[in-house]
Image (spheres, coloured by chain):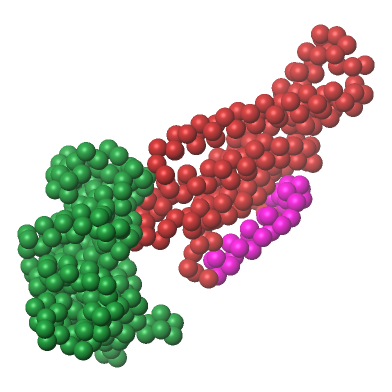
Amino acid sequence: MLRAENLYKRFDDLAVLNGVSLSVTRGEVVAILGASGGGKSTLLRCLTGLERVERGGIAIGGRALCAAGPDGRAVYPHEKIMRQVLRPVGLVFQGFNLFPHFSVLRNLTEAQVLLGRPQRDAREKALALLHKVGLSDKADQYPYQLSGGQSQRVAIARALALDPDLLCFDEPTSALDPRLTQEVLGVIRALAAERRTMLVVTHEVQFAREVSDRVILMQDGVVLDEGTPDVVLGKDASLAMRSFLGAEPQ
Amino acid sequence: MSPFASPAALGNLLAQLLDGSLTTLRIFAWTLVLSLPLGLIVALGRLSRRRWLAGLVSFYILIMRGTPLMLQIITVHFILPGIIPGMRIDRFVSTIVAFALNYAAYFAEIYRGGIQSIPVGQAEAARVLGFTRAQTFLRIILPQTLKRILQPVSNEVITLVKDTSLATVIAVGELFRAAKNESSRTASIEPLFIAGVFYLLMNLVVTCFFHWSEKRLSYYQ
């Protein structure tokens, strides 16, 4: 579904990605763990086209979002091609980024309509998704009337409205207090149970252990550890993982 | 001879002032119709990633905001016929051109501030949902900008009502000129005060309009 090879990215003098490779197969849930500043979010932003890598290649569903040229530099296609390649990818942000001037319903329908779905179908789909995340009664409200947890559930529904083949989460609960965190994790759990392909950047180790098929530990722009949660987070966890887990409140 | 001396004198004064007000309103309306959209184009130029374009637009804004509008009106009035051959010197057209160019610069800076105040996450969210750049701007950024710029724009529009009096410098017969003429003719100051009331009434309408707009946009935060 997703294949990224040898990604390099720097912001001015700071090297954020130092040769990261990653792949996600269909139906797999992959969790990316790591201390803040380790490059997790930047990786996700590069994979979803919000940032461009300097070197390396990214392919989504077999189509190139960018490809390494002869000199290793990443070559990106035209904006329009990128949009097509990224079409099957959804992203849920840490800060929700709902559109404040649209009702909850319209937050879910707008992109569908722009992609050519009839208004009625878009509306039906939106209402079904709101039902799914338990917010049917909020359809006509505006984002400022929602709690953080509700906002994030709407944001998840908004991403689902475009039927993504790959759904990415960028620390979806980091802006929420513990109680609201659980309601959002509940929704993601339900999606994992449907065998949706997901890539989740998170600080919730317990959650990663529970829902993911594979865990990746990132630090200083490289992948330090990778494997099934049983192995990577188990008794024989690597030194790097132990030190990360030790620092992270469980 | 006070304009209040007889009903006929007062009637004459009000007729003169109303006639001037009509011209004032025409300057006002034409300036807004032209400068509000032009300002958006200027703002986009100012925000352009093309350095030369952003620089050129910055220079334009500097000139427009940095020199007196009165001087700009005079300049346009004497230069315009030279640039466009065969064009007759039309005081009203010169005034509108100068006002539109001047106000576009102010509106552009207000738009720019508004656009830049929208969190970058809004454009990112739109982008991952497959919006094109144009769709993102027109459907996500611009509507939210509108709400944020309403107050600074109302300031400019109120100033514009009063600035129309600057057109008197090239002898456009707007409200202030009419009042000054009547004041000289009758050797009294009342016509000027009455003109002041006229401006005040116009701005009352402007103020009400913006209050109404603000209410209409208060359905979200």
The residue that appears at 33% across and 56% down in the rendered structure is: A97
The residue that appears at 77% across and 21% down in the rendered structure is: B16
Task: Give the image quarter of residue A189.
Answer: bottom left
Q: Eyeballing the image, is A35 above or below A124?
A: below
**Residue B3 on image: x %, y %:** 86, 16
Q: Does the rendering let one see residue B36?
A: yes
**Residue A247 on image: x %, y %:** 29, 79
A3 left or right of A103 in image: left
Q: Which residues are magenta?
A: B52-81
B68 left or right of A234 in image: right
The residue that appears at 37% across and 82% down in the rendered structure is: A10
Residue B61 on the magenta span: yes
B48 left or right of A63 in image: right
Supply the letter of whichever chain is green: A
Where's the N terminus of chain A, which quadrant?
Answer: bottom left
Residue B78 on the magenta span: yes
Q: Eyeballing the image, is B197 above or below A124?
A: above
Q: Eyeballing the image, is A244 above or below A82?
A: below
The answer to which of A145 and A124 lies nearer the viewer is A145
Task: Give the image quarter of residue B118.
Answer: bottom left
The answer to which of A85 and B73 lies nearer the viewer is A85
Where's the C terminus of chain A, which quadrant?
Answer: bottom left
Q: Chief secondary structure of the magenta span?
A: helix
**Residue B106 on image: x %, y %:** 62, 51
**Residue B96 on image: x %, y %:** 65, 42
The image shows a total of numbered marks equal to 0
The residue that appears at 11% across and 77% down in the rendered structure is: A229
The picture's colour for chain B is red
